[in-house]
Image (cartoon, rainbow, N blue to C red):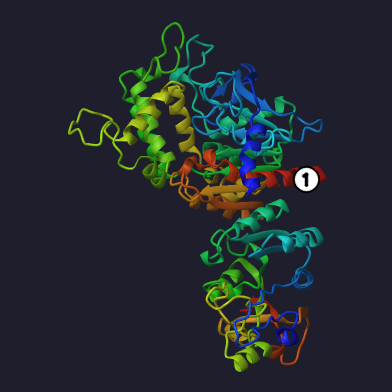
Amino acid sequence: MSAEIEEPKQREIVQGVGLVQTEFRTLFSADSPLILESGERLGPITVAYETYGTLSPERNNAIFVCHALTGDAHLAGRHSADERKPGWWDGFVGPGLGLDTDKYFVICANVLGGCQGTTGPISINPETGRPYGLKFPFLTVGDMVSVHRELVRSLGIDKLLAIVGGSLGGMQTLQWAAAYPESIHSVICLAAAAKLSAQGIAFNAVGRRAITVDPDFHDGDYYSADGPKKYGEEGPRTGLALARMVAHITYLSDVSIESKFGRKLQHSDQFAYELQRDTEFQVESYLHYQGKRFIERFDANSYLYLTRAMDYFDLAARYGSLETALGRTEARFLVTSYDTDWLFPSSQSREIVAALVKTSRHVTYLELQSVYGHDSFLIEIQQLEELVKPFLSETLRHATKH
Amino acid sequence: MSEALGSPLLGFRATFNIMPTKRYCYTDPEAALIDRLIMDQCRPGQRVLDLGCGDGRLLGRLRDELHCTIQGIELNHKHVVEAIGKGVPVLQGDLDAGLQEIPDGSFDVAVLSQTLQQVLHPKELLIQMLRVAKQALVVVPNFGHWRVRVQLLLHGRAPVTNSLPYDWYNTPNLHLLSILDFRDLINRMHLRIVREFPIIRGKPVSRAWAANVRADSALFVLEHLPN
């Protein structure tokens, strides 16, 4: 009992990586560009990344975290003491936490095509001196991973202890295993799939359409003449907010949305009988708020590119079969899904697991219970920590044995 | 009385009075003997699936000593975490769900130790085991043991034994079977018993007279009949 009371206090003390900063590295060049899956060439590419903990002299304790659709390199800690919120996986990454920065060197980088420091549609096209907009080349999950692989190499790391990610980040972990089978000792793939389902594509399509029909979209060329303004100040704001509202619903579960909001009204105990009022129910107000916050930190063109990359992702189609894609790596896999996740349902994780079992890979799989739907991997941090800690210790022990 | 009659393996609901029920389990040395017996049926380098693998103890030994490729399935969350801590790959799942993640013929051997009587559909599980593996190793409790018979005969009470250390109303053991019953099922399923080891007082023997009366449990090695 006393242990239960004391534990949260202890966690508070140990928690947190403190102040961190985003770093930048330029990879590839005009002379030796990255050849994208589409065949197009891109270079130089700037990558924004953050690191936590210390790389061991043997360089065998590095963990790379792949962020989800709208995440960024800011995994944990704060950029300044007055930053409103810490990094997106703060409770999971830090001294003594799930990804223990006392033991491991943790890296997270913004994806190619993103809008948080890594080269993307908002970056300046060297050929025109203007932001790329829709002139940015088409990109895939494979391209994102190629860039991150190059970043990891440039940091002097040949083989990662683990590649970790949820959702689109989980798709990237699978792509790492398929494309660079010898570059990883383990894969931690959370709430993900080896291909996006028709339902997932459908929701992405609605989001993209909301952006492209917005009168302020201007075929993606909505940046002001003297360079892009702050997010939320130009471009298809209504469309992007709408896209986020739709997507946000898919990240929740019927249980969580029901218990959080139910049918509660926002302003009164009684209906207003007024159609023009756009926030009668609390859940409406919540979604509007999510949309509003999102446009303050995201670029609409990036949203188009990244959701399309996600749509295209289909490991079995790309490699002939899932067994071929995943059967070449000696990496150990930890796969989890969540029972209330309807965007990336457990059946999709089971497909990954079946392919791994068939090819006699080392795989551990759990369907975890949570009310939080697809977002569970971001929220149920202690549940994850309980699995990830022994998994990583064993992987490290196994990796250093050979 | 229970002390006098109870074997190391078979606890005994002693009297007509309601006595505290003995909750026997295999002691560690006995479990280790059964693990040893199962390991003796496996060849080095085989692919082994353990259904209800617990904390992964047996699989860990198969990996370390016989260099087997291993996979466990376990429902209990605590055990799954323990297995991860041993570096044993494990799928959390219910055996009654039908081994859905396991493709046909993925394993050489599927092990099911002291669990068949606890699943809803034992026959279906045996079919599944021989779908995913060439050989099935099954340890079943023997409720034909003479002490169980005596217990029922003399006291008229449902037996509480090691293999069945629970009261009838609160037990994971859904099916009571004897060695003869099991052989009969295998016969009806048109499967082949490759080997059979009665386990008497915790010790496996290669052959025993009146095994259905004397054995606490038995290990069966099963295969499909050759076509």
Answer whether residue A93 is visible to the viewer in this image.
yes
- Residue B91 position, x and y percent, is 61, 56
Residue holding disc 1: A397
For the N terminus of chain B, the image quarter is: bottom right
The amino acid type, in three-letter code, at marker 1 is Arg
- Please identify the quarter of the rendering in which residue B214 is found: bottom right
- Residue A283 position, x and y percent, is 34, 36
Q: Secondary structure at mark 1?
A: helix
- Give the farthest residue toward the top: A226
Query: In this view of the protein, which residue sits in the foreground, B27 or A304?
Result: B27
- Give the farthest residue toward the left: A273
- Residue B33 position, x and y percent, is 78, 73
- Please identify the quarter of the rendering in which residue A295 is found: top left
Residue at position x 56%, y 60% in the image: B93
Q: Is residue A268 above or below residue B52?
A: above
Residue at position x 60%, y 56% in the image: B77
Residue at position x 53%, y 67% in the image: B96
In the picture, measured across the screen, residue A386 lies left or right of residue B6, that is left
Query: In this view of the protein, which residue sits in the foreground, B4 or B50?
Result: B4
In the picture, measured across the screen, residue B216 lies left or right of residue B169, that is right
Q: Chain of mark 1?
A: A
Answer whether residue A196 is visible to the viewer in this image.
no
